[in-house]
Amino acid sequence: MDLTYRQSVVDEISLIGSTTPNKIPLRSIYFGGGTPSLAPLTTLREIMRALLEPDDAPFYLENEGDAEITIEMDPGTFNLTYLEAIKAMGFNRISLGVQSFDDDILATMGRVHRSADVYRSIEMIQEVFGEEDSNYSIDLISGVPGLTLAGWTETLYNAVRLHPRPLHISLYDLQVEQGTYFGKIYGDGRKEDSSTAAPVVVASSKSGNATTHPFLPSSEDCAFMYRYASGYLRSKRYQHYEISSYAYVDDDGLAHRSKHNQIYWEVGGQWYAIGLGSTSNVDGVRFARPRALSDYISWTRELKEAYGKDVNAEPPWLQSSNGNGEENVGGEDDISDIIMTRLRTSEGLDLDWIAEHYDTSHVEAILGGFELALDLDLGERVGNSTERVGLIRLKDPNGFLFSNNIISNIFVELDSVEE
């Protein structure tokens, strides 16, 4: 199956090349989704070669010495030989799925690796890439069943003491949703405060045996975890540049932000996406590939056959509508996406850009919705004058913490304009 999927990905890459007149410049390449470090090296090597190496390859690195090439890896899924091989392929950044340093918490989340695997993985990264070039990011999860406030502070303490230090840290709060494993255990989700937090006992419908699951942190405790992380990591020279993202600021003042993720958050950002379930955004068209493996393989085969007959046909990732039942968004950048992504960042939303590309009624609606943030001291408006509208941004940490409420309020105001 790996060989079949690999060929489908390579075929999609070839189709991009055959339907694009000029090579496409890239600032970054990101191998993610699932656990790419479980893929055979031959698969990674073949995909990298197809992207960049042949004369008819569709892409080239815009600034090869500064390009960021990342692969997601889970601790315990690779060894020194694997790391040396991906380094030789050109990978220069690793996103390490740490999630926790507590073995009990890792077991609760159903993770295979343990803390010893985390530390060994980082030792190997240093051994292969060298201390100066060990460019890696770690993911940590808050709000996990059984995680106490003290346990969260210890998690962050362990993170900043890693050697070599992670140049980037991403923090995510566990979402308990219906239909998921945790949703079945904890039902309606988190309690508002910690006073009623308690272990949950669930009886098996088959055996009748009862299983005790650890308490679920309350919404109040999760909010504390978010606020504490922001203050603590900023005190350790990590720049909180996006709701979930922290970049280490080195002695030269350089913040090691994720170059790839910033493309998603910038106005007018474009990206190609290749492979099962991936979504691209090119020339204002958002296109999602099939999510089922068999459907994706069939889709690439059909495309290969179709474009072999008509080389002038427009590829589906550039069409404003398609027959796959997937949602495409064409034309101008959708204003809702721009608001949502820009207010997730520390730079905020440029209202002068909105005024230039839309109109003053949109600016007024956005400001009307943002009044809630100003009234509650969750946001600020800066740079406004008689000639400029300025920008708005959410404050760290409370503004970021309640960003969904503020953004929803803005959308309500925008609805009246669009009607």
Image (cartoon, rainbow, N blue to C red):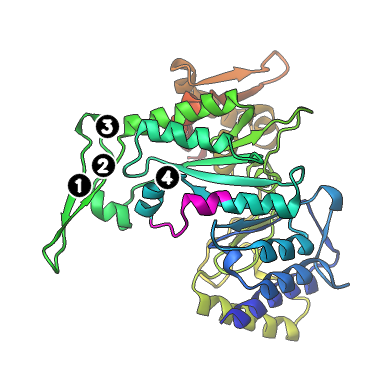
Q: Which residue is drawn at the image coordinates 69% and 60% (left, top)? A: 272
- Looking at the image, do the residues carrying marks 4 and 2 touch, with CB atoms under 8 Å apart? no
Dot 4 or dot 2: first in sequence order is 4
Residue carrying label 1: 200
Element at label 3: loop
Residue carrying label 3: 192
Residue 415 location, x and y as percent? Answer: 47, 37
Callout 3: 10 Å neighbours few (<14), some, many (20+)? some
- Looking at the image, do the residues carrying marks 2 and 3 touch, with CB atoms under 8 Å apart? no
Res 47 → quadrant:
bottom right
Q: Residue furthest left?
A: 208
- Looking at the image, do the residues carrying marks 3 and 1 touch, with CB atoms under 8 Å apart? no
Q: Which label lies toward us, 3 or 4?
A: 4
Q: Nearer the viewer, residue 407 or 65?
A: 65
Q: Nearer the viewer, residue 74 or 318?
A: 74
Residue carrying label 4: 102
Residue 402 location, x and y as percent? Answer: 44, 30
Cα gap from disc 4 to disc 1, whole angstroms: 20 Å
* Residue 229 shown in magenta: no
- Which three-letter amino acid code belongs to the residue tagged 1? Val
Cα gap from disc 4 to disc 2, whole angstroms: 16 Å
Residue carrying label 2: 215
- Looking at the image, do the residues carrying marks 2 and 1 touch, with CB atoms under 8 Å apart? yes
Cα gap from disc 3 to disc 4, whole angstroms: 25 Å
351 vs 374: above or below: below
Dot 2 or dot 3: first in sequence order is 3
Tell me which segment is drawn in magenta: 110-119
Callout 4: 10 Å neighbours few (<14), some, many (20+)? some
Q: Residue furthest right?
A: 55
Element at label 4: loop
